[in-house]
Amino acid sequence: MIMENNKDTYQRITDYVIEQLDKGEIVWQKGWNTYGLPRNAVTANTYQGWNAFFLNFVTMYNEYKTPYFLTYKQAMDKGGTIRRGQKGYAIIWWATMEDKSKIVNTNESGEAEYLQYRVPKTHVVFNIDQTYGIEFPQVEKPFRTHTEKIHACEKVINEMNDRPLIKHGGDKAYYIPSIDAITLPPVEMFHSDQAYYKTLFHELAHSTGHVSRLNRKEINRFKKFGDENYSREELTAELTAAFLSAICGIEANTINNSAAYIQGWLNQLKNDKKLILKAASQAQAAADYILNKSSVSNIKEQVKESITI
């Protein structure tokens, strides 16, 4: 991934996604590697938001053995280095900045507290296949039977707090915010069990935007199918479903990659350089809500930050 210093991070990421779409590649739709979500090889922390999709794409596209990455410094600290001629991959991290022109409070000591905001910065990581002189622990490739995958999906659904009503009938899948209910076709109408759960994850993602949950404007304010808010919400739901599918070990391709679909995203991205990072951030928050990974107040803060992107 080549990045020029004179471009802001939003534009760099968007340019990369557009470049791949022009080739017919949808970064967020790439099948998940068999090891699950990408993670840092030293800290074992999983990458979040856009970074998870990007590094999974990198792993699959370059046929790396595992989705484990580290920085140049981490490689040096481990007593090794990066192989000659290898190129790294720029991922984002969020830096907290202050606007000295806007005072929001004065503390007890009389010191001004300024408006804070977050901006994306980048640093470079390398896959462990690109390193030299480091012995990494052997990692067993996780294996789940079909039954175990379905059990994992059911566990995610059943343990979601404040879950919307889920009912079955008809031949379409949809979520209605006004009654906070998901409708799905009967299970037997799907071509596979995994397709059923991927669709349900997509609709659960929509439900996290309800006013009583994360209150996403994209789902609460859209006026008609196909308008700007609807398109943004659809992307957030797809990315959320992809996160949940990776965690449960099922395939995540719930959207088609037709020429019309790709052209639609090209048009959206060219008009909004912040779209993909915002959607990925909101998808992470939605997945965390469904998985009960953090307090609702903390997740809402995530959403507030993504809205300011």
Image (spheres, rainbow, N blue to C red):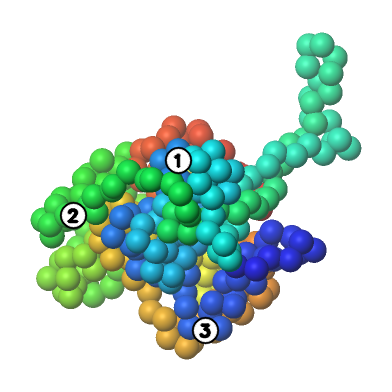
Q: On screen, 294 above or below 31?
A: above
Distance, label 1 to label 3, CA atoms, is: 33 Å
Q: Earlier in the sequence, mark 1 or mark 2?
A: 1
In the rendered image, the residue lying farthest to the top is 109
Label 1 crowd bin: few (<14), some (14–19), many (20+), radius 10 Å: some
Q: Residue at x 31, y 52 (%)?
A: 247
User: x, y (%) of residue 117?
Assistant: 72, 41
Nearest the viewer among 170 and 56 is 56
Q: Secondary structure at mark 3?
A: loop
Name the amino acid type tagged 2.
Phe
Q: Secondary structure at mark 2?
A: loop
Which of the numbered marks, if any, corresponds to residue 23?
3
Along the horizontal axis of the image, is 137 left or right of 216?
Answer: left
Distance, label 1 to label 2, CA atoms, is: 23 Å
Nearest the viewer among 96 and 203 is 96
Name the amino acid type tagged 3.
Lys
**Residue indicated by mark 1:** 42
Along the horizontal axis of the image, is 213 left or right of 20?
Answer: left
Label 2 crowd bin: few (<14), some (14–19), many (20+), radius 10 Å: few
In this orientation, does residue 140 appear?
yes
Q: On screen, 40 above or below 226?
A: above
Q: Earlier in the sequence, mark 2 or mark 3?
A: 3
